[in-house]
Image (cartoon, coloured by chain):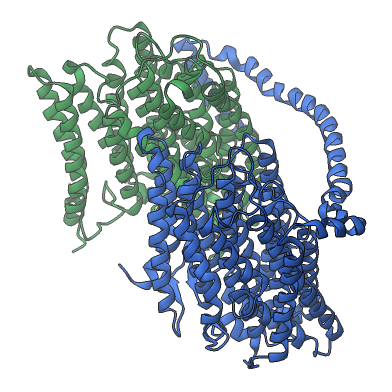
Chain colours: A green, B blue
């Protein structure tokens, strides 16, 4: 019974886990008004909400798929991959932000975190432009609150919120503008339908309009993934924002941004047969964005003394690496059917996203753990001599930073290897093949530049002695669970990446 | 759970776990002195698992993963239409690995027990046991791997552990230097092994590193690549030369005696140094196809045997005598391996592996006895400083005597039987058409070496345990049960393992002869087992002659020995100074390399400045774009809009 009715019914079923999350979030909002609610209760409820969502994911999964070109939600493998990543990240971040807020505001914070998690999960499921936009906004709007809540009094925090709010709204406008062009061109908001129609249109006279649409969409999403020149907010917001929210901001918008980009531009592969020129233009767009983004991120990262600013630029650079995968995505269509390849662009992106998430969130957990108002840990000098005073923290931070550098046996290496290989393995028949080889080289040079500022931190931790009074010993909180999980992922994906690569491959197989 | 296949995995996994536990024990202050507990337990359990596995090797080999038809466990895999490079994890226990496993885990366990007493109270106690456990894990992985790459992982693992343990007392400069030397010299061979493995992979169709897969293509390969194939074999052999301390790479082994004595016994006598012998036995199916390579192997083996025996004649350091004797005995094994081809391969290889097996027992007991002496003599091992210890250290004396008699090849003891098989292989190889004379010559060398072996072994024995009682200052001779029990167990092994396993029952050769690689190498030829009485009587007489001379010269006072040394100055000093090989290497190899290094340092200074200059470019670029990041939100918004406009403009107007 593959009817319209069934399709709409299963569309609701697909959203059950997210509905559950939002429901729990509402409970938390209400609880926040009650007296005597402390942050531990809020944290446990949030974790419970995520558990309910995960369970309902397995129980409420529709068995018969609906009609692709009708349904607003699509439960393919890609959606499930994004959902699992979102829920896992949500749980890690709940533990991270356990003590971020005082007892009064914690339940509000956790509620916002759950809603944002639901939003990022829905991005993977969305099969409709409007739905996609709403899902992306569902990530953005709670973020404003999360940036604001923990540091109500701090001037820097307020500045960060305002900056993020203004620029985020602007980027959403760009995104919506691009969407309106796509709708205008194709006459539909359904993504599956757009994948069918758009290739035929770009072959004709509509290619200029389509290019403008693509650029605007990319600009809007470029803000979320911190691509140059839409990244300017990142350093200021990272520096001023509360660390738990920064961890969220560093990872979740990148996941939803890349998921949306992959879903939207999957049609480029099928368009090559009819509109070679157009596909080349689109590849050029991502090529330029990738090269500029990673170079700008790494070069600016060199100058930073503030750890969180440095991580912001590192996030920019990593977005640049991942854009390599997007740029080579259309070349997949030029490949022979049985031609084996180490990794295609989208596979590499999915793998690197998770690797990046583990190492970035991990780095921020350690910084957050060490930081206290009396003895701030903000600059490179603040972690000098960490090996002597906090050997375990230093070891963990060392693992994460080595992974950022991309040393073998870490997830960062495996991810970078896959991304660069995807560029080097562009099929011979594809246009711009030489340019992709050049892009891989630019990536490698950038990785070398980036190694410098990560190594500076490692050098400070292990080889220098503490400049001021050593940071006081702190008891390990729930935060440490997140840190250790991230470290295990970082090492496990690095030592034995094959299962994760296979998962990524399965996820992007249907695009 | 206790399937043979899972137990097979447990054999290397348990010592690995033991190593991790030792490290964990080391990080807790109260547990540090108990760090031997996980090491001993895991080694013993691993030994039990190994014995169970070996008892299950009947007609069929034991594999992990059990189902061989499914996807292998792959670390990574890269495949194109014509090439497949994949690092697979697969274990396989056949008869050859089984024999090795028994030796490694059984002797290893007793040596770990011995170390409890020997290492008591030394700094870094947990570190020692962690490294030894890791060694056992690597060594068992080496012999169980079913492909060249995984074997190489174990191979490098044992190299690393050897480095860590030779340099165990790392604040002692000589120990640090010895560790570095051991690592670098064996590394020379390792490079060859890796190249050889990849050559074989390439010739076998760029598909798999699996032994079975490559061996099956051996005949094809030798036809298609008549020169490249022997070259690959020689490269693999060079790995064996490095690890098993053969000429010209044997120089690291004597220096490796700087490590704690249990390490010398375990790694540098019983197990790791036999990895090369194992490798060649494993690859017998390949090597027997190249007679010239086999002749090279035999020549290198025999030459090393007599060279090392000659040096051992005059050494004063007890452990060094044993070290050179190890080099020499390994030479014997390679001589036997080199006879495979002219002789039925399963016979010659069995001779080598049998000698490996018996040698592991008696050399371990000799080293542990030497360790016991050293422990009692306040860490002094120079034979000129002590003598007549047989009353003070009765158990040690007995154990050493058993080991020495076995090593000397006294009739009916272990070493006698295995050495006899080697001599018989060489003699039989002399009857072959190609290289026949050469093998006769090598037989002569071998029998001479056997006499020298008996002499220098008993020279050491008489000088240490006979004569007037003499001890260095500060020595307080004592023996403890934790050291005595392993000594006695291994001593019994040294005496009996040979006669039980082979000469009358032929159990050993029948068992080993079923190994697939040997069946393939045999190509239908059948080994004849008979007792060659003239040869046995001859080699027994030679051993007795050597012992007799040693007795005459050293049992009482050593006046006659001193006179002989005075009369034969040149050969005496040549032997005492190890034939000046280290000095020759220093002039020929080390010094030129140092000169190159100096030149490189000069170049590096120039390159360094150039790189600094290049490294300034990103910083300069950063300073250029830094003003963009001015903190003004309106400017950020403007930048976004301008960026958007620029991209649209470029794509629509320029790139069209």
Relative depth, front residue between A43 and B350: B350
In this rendering, the answer to whether A258 lies above or below B223 is above
| Quadrant of the frame with the C terminus of chain B | top right
- In the picture shown, does residue A423 fall above or below B437? above
Residue B402 occupies which quadrant of the picture? bottom right
Asked whether the viewer can see residue A172, the reply is no
Is residue B322 found left or right of A65 in the rendered image? right
Task: Tell me where residue A263 sits by quadrant.
Answer: top left
Where does residue B418 sit, x and y in percent of width and height? 63, 78
Count the numbered circles shown. Answer: 0
- Report the front residue among B612 and A87: B612
Left or right of residue A219: residue A77: left
Q: Quadrant of the N terminus of chain B?
A: bottom left
Q: Which residue lies at the image location 47% right of the left edge and 15% below the top edge?
A: A382
Which quadrant would residue B517 be assigned to in this image? bottom right
Residue A395 position in % (x across, y down): 46, 31
Q: Inspect this view and state whether residue B373 appears.
A: yes
Residue B22 pos. (x, y %): 42, 45
In front of the other: A41 or A290: A41
The residue depicted at 37 percent of the width and 24 percent of the height is: A246
* Up/down of B367 relative to A321, above or below: below
- On the image, the x and y values in percent for residue A380 come to 51, 17
Pick the residue in front: A261 or A271: A261
- In the picture, measured across the screen, residue A462 lies left or right of residue A154, that is right
């Amino acid at each position: 019974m593959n009817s319209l009715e069934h399709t709409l019914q299963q569309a609701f079923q697909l959203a059950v886990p997210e509905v559950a999350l939002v429901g729990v979030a509402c409970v938390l909002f209400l609880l926040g008004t009650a007296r005597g609610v402390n942050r531990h209760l809020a944290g446990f409820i949030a974790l419970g909400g995520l558990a309910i969502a995960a369970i309902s994911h397995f129980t409420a999964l529709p068995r018969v798929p609906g009609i692709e070109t009708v349904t607003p939600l699509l439960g393919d493998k890609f959606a499930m991959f994004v959902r699992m990543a979102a829920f896992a990240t949500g749980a890690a971040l709940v533990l991270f932000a356990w003590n971020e807020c005082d007892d009064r505001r914690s339940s509000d914070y956790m509620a916002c975190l759950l809603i944002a998690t639901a939003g990022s999960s829905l991005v993977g499921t969305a099969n409709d432009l409007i739905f996609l936009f709403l899902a992306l906004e569902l990530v953005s709007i709670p973020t404003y609150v999360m940036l604001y809540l923990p540091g109500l009094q701090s001037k820097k925090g307020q500045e960060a919120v305002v900056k993020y709010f203004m620029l985020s709204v602007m980027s959403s406008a760009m995104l919506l503008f691009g969407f309106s062009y796509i709708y205008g061109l194709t006459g539909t908001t359904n993504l599956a339908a757009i994948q069918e129609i758009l290739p035929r249109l770009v072959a004709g006279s509509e290619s200029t309009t389509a290019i403008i649409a693509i650029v605007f969409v990319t600009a809007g999403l470029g803000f979320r993934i911190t691509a140059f020149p839409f990244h300017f907010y990142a350093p200021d917001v990272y520096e001023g924002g509360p660390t738990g929210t920064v961890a969220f901001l560093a990872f979740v918008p990148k996941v939803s941004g890349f998921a949306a980009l992959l879903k939207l531009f999957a049609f480029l592969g099928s368009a090559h047969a009819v509109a070679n020129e157009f596909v080349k233009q689109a590849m050029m767009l991502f090529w330029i964005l990738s090269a500029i983004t990673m170079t700008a991120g790494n070069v600016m990262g060199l100058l930073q003394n503030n750890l969180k600013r440095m991580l912001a630029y590192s996030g920019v650079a990593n977005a640049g690496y991942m854009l390599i995968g997007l740029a080579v995505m259309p070349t997949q269509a030029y490949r022979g059917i049985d031609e084996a390849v180490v990794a295609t662009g989208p596979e590499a992106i999915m793998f690197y996203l998770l690797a990046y998430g583990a190492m970035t969130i991990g780095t921020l957990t350690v910084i957050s753990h060490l930081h206290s108002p009396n003895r701030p840990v903000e600059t490179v000098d603040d972690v000098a001599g960490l090996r002597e005073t906090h050997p375990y923290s230093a070891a963990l931070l060392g693992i994460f930073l080595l992974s950022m550098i991309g040393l073998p046996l870490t997830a960062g290496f495996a991810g970078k290897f896959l991304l660069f290989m995807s560029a080097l393995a562009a099929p011979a028949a594809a246009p711009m093949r030489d340019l992709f080889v050049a892009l891989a080289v630019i990536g490698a040079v950038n990785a070398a530049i980036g190694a410098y500022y990560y190594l500076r931190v490692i050098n400070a931790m292990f080889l220098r002695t503490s400049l001021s009074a050593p940071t006081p010993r702190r008891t390990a909180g729930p935060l440490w669970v997140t840190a250790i999980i991230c470290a295990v992922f970082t090492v496990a994906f690095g030592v034995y990446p094959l299962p994760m690569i296979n998962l990524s491959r399965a996820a992007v197989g249907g695009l | 759970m206790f399937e043979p296949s899972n137990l097979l995995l447990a054999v290397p996994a348990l010592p690995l776990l033991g190593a991790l536990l030792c490290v964990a024990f080391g990080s807790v202050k109260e547990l540090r002195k108990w760090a031997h507990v996980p090491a001993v337990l895991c080694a013993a359990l691993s030994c039990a698992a190994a014995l169970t596995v070996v008892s299950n090797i009947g007609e069929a080999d034991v594999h992990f993963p059990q189902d061989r038809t499914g996807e292998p466990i792959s670390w990574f895999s890269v495949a194109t239409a014509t090439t497949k490079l994949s690092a697979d994890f697969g274990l396989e226990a056949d008869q050859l690995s089984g024999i090795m496993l028994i030796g490694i885990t059984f002797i290893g366990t007793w040596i770990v027990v011995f170390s409890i007493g020997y290492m008591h109270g030394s700094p870094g106690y947990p570190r020692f046991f962690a490294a030894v456990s890791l060694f056992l894990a690597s060594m068992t992985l080496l012999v169980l791997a079913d492909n060249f790459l995984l074997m190489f992982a174990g191979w490098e693992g044992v190299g690393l552990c050897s480095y860590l343990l030779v340099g165990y007392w790392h604040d002692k400069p000589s120990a640090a230097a010895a560790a570095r030397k051991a690592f670098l010299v064996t590394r020379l061979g390792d490079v060859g092994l890796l190249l050889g493995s990849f050559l074989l992979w390439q010739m076998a169709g760029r598909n798999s590193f699996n032994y079975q897969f490559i061996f099956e293509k051996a005949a094809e390969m030798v036809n298609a690549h008549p020169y490249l194939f022997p070259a690959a074999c020689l490269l693999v052999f060079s790995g064996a030369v490095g690890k098993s301390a053969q000429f010209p790479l044997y120089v690291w082994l004597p220096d490796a005696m700087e490590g704690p004595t249990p390490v010398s016994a375990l790694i540098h006598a019983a197990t790791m140094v036999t990895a090369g012998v194992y490798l060649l036995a494993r690859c017998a199916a390949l090597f027997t196809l190249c007679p010239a390579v086999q002749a090279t192997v035999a020549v290198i083996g025999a030459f090393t045997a007599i060279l090392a025996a000659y040096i051992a004649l005059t050494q004063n350091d007890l452990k060094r005598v044993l070290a050179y004797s190890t080099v020499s005995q390994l030479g014997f094994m390679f001589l036997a391996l080199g006879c495979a081809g002219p002789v039925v391969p399963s016979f010659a290889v069995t001779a080598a592996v049998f000698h490996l097996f018996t040698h592991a027992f008696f050399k371990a007991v000799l080293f542990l006895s030497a360790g016991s002496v050293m422990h009692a003599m306040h860490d002094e091992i120079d034979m000129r400083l002590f003598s007549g210890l047989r009353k003070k250290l009765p158990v040690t004396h007995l154990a050493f005597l058993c080991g020495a008699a076995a090593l000397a090849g006294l009739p009916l003891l272990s070493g006698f039987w295995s050495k006899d098989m080697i001599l018989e292989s060489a003699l039989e190889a002399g009857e072959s058409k190609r290289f026949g004379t050469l093998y006769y010559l090598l037989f002569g060398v071998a029998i001479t070496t056997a006499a020298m072996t008996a002499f220098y072994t008993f020279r050491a024995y008489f000088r240490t345990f006979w004569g007037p009682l003499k001890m260095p200052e500060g020595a307080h001779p004592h023996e403890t049960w934790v050291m005595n029990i392993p000594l006695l167990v291994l001593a019994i092994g040294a005496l009996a393992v040979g006669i039980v396993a082979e000469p009358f029952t032929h159990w050993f050769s029948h068992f080993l002869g079923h190994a697939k690689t040997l069946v393939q190498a045999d190509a239908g030829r059948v080994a004849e087992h008979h007792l060659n009485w003239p040869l046995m009587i001859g080699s027994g007489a030679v051993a007795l002659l050597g012992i007799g001379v040693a007795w005459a010269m050293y049992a009482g006072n050593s006046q006659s020995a001193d006179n002989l040394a005075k009369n034969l100055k040149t050969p005496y000093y040549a032997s005492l100074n190890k034939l000046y090989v280290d000095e020759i290497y220093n002039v020929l190899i080390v010094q030129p390399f140092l000169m190159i290094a100096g030149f490189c340092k000069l170049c590096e200074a120039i390159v360094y400045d150039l790189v600094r200059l290049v490294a300034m470019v990103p910083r300069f670029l950063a300073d250029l774009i830094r003003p963009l990041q001015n903190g003004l939100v309106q400017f950020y918004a403007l930048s976004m809009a301008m960026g958007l406009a620029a991209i649209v403009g470029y794509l629509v107007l320029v790139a069209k």
